[in-house]
Structures are given as structure tokens and as C-alpha cells.
Image (spheres, grey):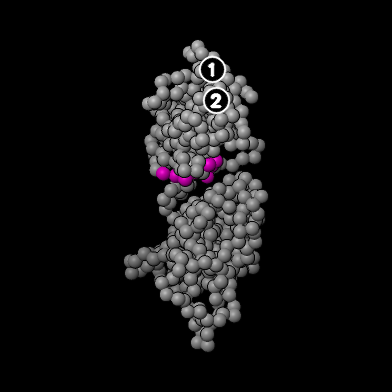
Amino acid sequence: MSGAGESTVALLDSKLPFREYTCLGDWFVGRNHYFVASNTKESRREERYRCFVRDREEDLYMGLSMTPECSVLNTPQNSPIRFRLSYAKHEVVTSGCYLPRNLTGRWQSTGPGEAQMVINATDIRETTWRGYAAKTTSYTCLEQRGDRYLMAKLSVEGCQTEYVCWELVPRHHNIVRYRVSWALIYQDFQVCDSSNFRSGRVWKYDTLIADSPTPISCPFSGRFVFQQVGGSPLLPRIVGGITSSPLDSYPCPVRRTVMSVCDSERKLIEIDLDLCVSLNKDGHPIDFNSVTDYRLQCVGYWQENMLSYLVTHDPSDSVSRFRCWVYQRVSDTQIRLSQSVGAACGLRQTFLSSNYSESAAVAFTLTLRIHGGSRIRHSPCSGSPGVPVSSASPAAASSCSPSWCSLEGESDSSPSHSPYVAVIQCDLPGGTLGVISEIETTSPLFQSGGTCTIKYLIATLQSRQHATCESWPQPQL
């Protein structure tokens, strides 16, 4: 039993007079939280002491005894006197700073409790669910320094305003990374000291995901065959449930598990776990009714702690509509992926993780289909200025010095192309402006008398170790 002589409980009900109790001590029995209180304004000894009981997992009800005995209290619902509680905001705090404008809206948190967040210019409202009961906490911005915001925490469970610090990393795509400090009782920016954050020696940010995200381009693309291993592997299914009419089925001797990021904007990951790749005698696919099993939208990606993270959105996922992935390109044609159990990637999760102990559900090994006409897309070259070239032949290009970026931009592994792939923007003699890619050094374009700007030039993956530049500037390979 622990003493708590300074705590008070005020009871106000339409059928009971106002009473104020001083807590004397409390203890726990299973889910029940018992505490004994004293009414200091009551002179009769038998009426002075009362026993209360609350459910630690359900805050809406509280039981009260009619005598000093606690043995009559089994649960809050089966008590002589029952109270149904509701939350009430107890104080209004005037804001002193503004939150970033691009944070306004509804968000899904991956932090403790996976709260739902509503953010406006000055306040953050956090709602967590305990069964069917919602608990709401409000935070009001008081002071800002850099990415850290001192905020007043207006909790519906306490009678005193607390102060916490939010560190908000600038928004990237549909993702905002953040962390929150421990709550203190004094208003001072020392609350934002690094030692006060709820972070151990090894830590990572929690994330806010836009509740209605806008799909973005995925960090990789192409058509891959893959293997999966883990406690919760993906299983074949039909997106949308039962079809309106039966699907025709034919015997298929060759099936593949395929992951594709091949739409024009690279915003959709399609996974087919039993794609039939067999052809009939006429060269047409046998299974023309093939249906994709999973369709995932990319909503954000970033790098942290030397790892690459991706968040996808799948409204049909029965576990979590958001999933976090750790990915890593291990070779020119291979990518390793690890899918999290829920919307958050675990602290120990890497691209090799495949079990629950590391917060992972399943791990994938993707292998690019080299002869399938697909490309591995890399991060575009940043800061590669165009170099004007006035030429009537490729030889005139040798005087320019474009910015080279090894394995950047788009690479093609098809052996039918020349050793180098150029992306060139040209003003043609007819006055039109064209963007031409995968151009050979012997192209008639260089004999047309046009003015060209070389955006970037790279070697194909197949020949980058052996290609010669001839009249082109030698790249830094």
C-alpha cells in the first residue's frame, strides 16, 4: 500500500451532495485498482472512510462502497454506488507560437498507442482508444526553437498542466518524423533538453502518416521475381473479394511470384503470387484472367540510422492499412526487403529481418528480370547542369564536360543498346523541342545541325566495366 495524502477526489452527482475525499492509500488486485479515502469534513467515524475501485483498462466507471469495507467491491460495475465518468478539459492555455503550415490535417501516429492526430496552426489533439473508450489529450504550442516546440499538455486525466517538448522533423512526402519528451511540471525550454527525451542509447523517430495520403513515386521500379521467408508470408487472394462471375482456369505448368513497379508514374507496387507465365501454341498467355493479389501505394520513404525505410498504403490490409518496409539494394539486380508487422518499423528491424522478435512479418529477396524489358531506377542526378553542344557530328561533343554520376538516373541492361545511354534535350532544325533517351553515338541526330544540351550520360549496367568512350568524355567509373 502506498500513501498519497495530498491527493483528493471530488464527487459531484445529481443524487449526492458535494463531497471531497483525501486519498490514504491504494493497491492493485488483477485489473482492479482499489484506494481508500477519507472525508475530512465528516465527524462520524463510520461515515468518514470509504473505499473506491477502478478498472485499470477501462476509465469510464468507478465504484464506491457505502461502508468502510472494501470486500463488497468486486468490479466497478458491481458496486453499491457506481459512477460513470466523462473527460473534461480543465484549462485554457494561450498559444505563443505556430506549427509548420504543412502539418495541418489528420495524421496516423506509429508511436505508443498508434494515436490519431489532428493538427492545426497552434494545437495538436491526440486521441487514443482503450477498447470502446477514447482518450483525448491536447497540446498547445508555447515556444519554438528550431525543430523543437515547447508545448502545454492539457490532459483530461489530471488537474495540473504539464509541459512536454515535441521535436518535429520537416515533412517529407506524406511522412512527419517526431519524438516527444517526458512531461514536466514547470514551463521552461529546458524541457526540450536532449536528455529529457524518451530515447535510449539507440533510438529512432516515431512517424506521423497522413490519414489520406497522396501516392508518390516509389524509390525503385522494375519487374522482379522474389522469394519470401518469415512468420507471416503473403498468401494468394483476390483483391476486392468474390468476383461477379467465375474466372476461367487452365492448367499452367509454370508460375512465378512477381513484384512489379511498372506503372507510368511508379506509384503502385503490384504483387502476384501465382502469375502464370506459360504461353499457348499461338504465343498468347494461357491465364488471361490473371488477377493481382496485392496493390500497394507508396506514400513516403526516407533514410535513418543507415537504413532505408518505405511506407505503403493498402486499404484492404486487415492488420494495418499502412506498412513499413526496410529495403536495401544489394547488387545491380537484387533488392532485399523486410515488411513490418504493423505501421511502424521496429528499432532492431533491418532489411534481413523476417521474424516477430525484430518486429518483422516477412522478408523478400527481389531479383530483377533482366530480359523482361524492365529497368532498375536509381535516384536522379542532382545538380548536373546541362552543357550546350553545337555539333554536326559526335566528335564535336568531346570538348564538353558534363557532370558524371555513376549508376544514377536510368540504366538499361539490354545488350541491344550501345555502351552508353544519353539523355539529351535538343532544339531540332524544325524548331521543335524534344527529349531523347537511349541514343547511340552514331545517331543521325548529330548530323542534323541541331543544338543539344547533354543532361547526363551513363554506362549500361552490363558494359560499364568494359565500355570505351571513344570521342565522348571519359566518365569517372
Residue 51 tag number: 2
In the image, what residue occupies the spot 52% across and 85% down? Answer: 280
Query: What range of the chain is rendered magenta?
Result: 106-113
Between disc 1 and disc 2, the foreground one is 1
Query: As drawn, is 187 to the left or to the right of 351?
Result: left
In the image, what residue occupies the spot 41% across and 30% down? Answer: 88
Q: Where is residue 419 shown, x and y percent of the image?
A: 57, 69
> Mark 1 or mark 2: which comes first in sequence?
1
Count of marks placed on residues: 2
Three-letter amino acid code at the position of disc 2: Cys
Q: Where is residue 15 shown, x and y percent of the image?
A: 39, 26
Q: Would you place residue 288 above or below residue 302 in this image?
A: below
Q: Is residue 241 visible?
A: yes
- Decide: few, some or many residues near mark 2? Use Cα within 10 Å; few <14, some 14-19, many ≥20: many
- Decide: few, some or many residues near mark 1? Use Cα within 10 Å; few <14, some 14-19, many ≥20: few
Q: Would you place residue 453 above or below residue 118 in this image?
A: below
Q: CA distance from mark 1 to mark 2?
A: 12 Å
Three-letter amino acid code at the position of disc 1: Glu
- Quadrant that contains the C terminus: bottom right
Residue position for label 1: 46
Q: Where is residue 153 shown, x and y percent of the image?
A: 47, 29
Q: Secondary structure at mark 1?
A: helix
The stretch drawn in magenta includes residue 112 = yes
- Quadrant that contains the N terminus: top right
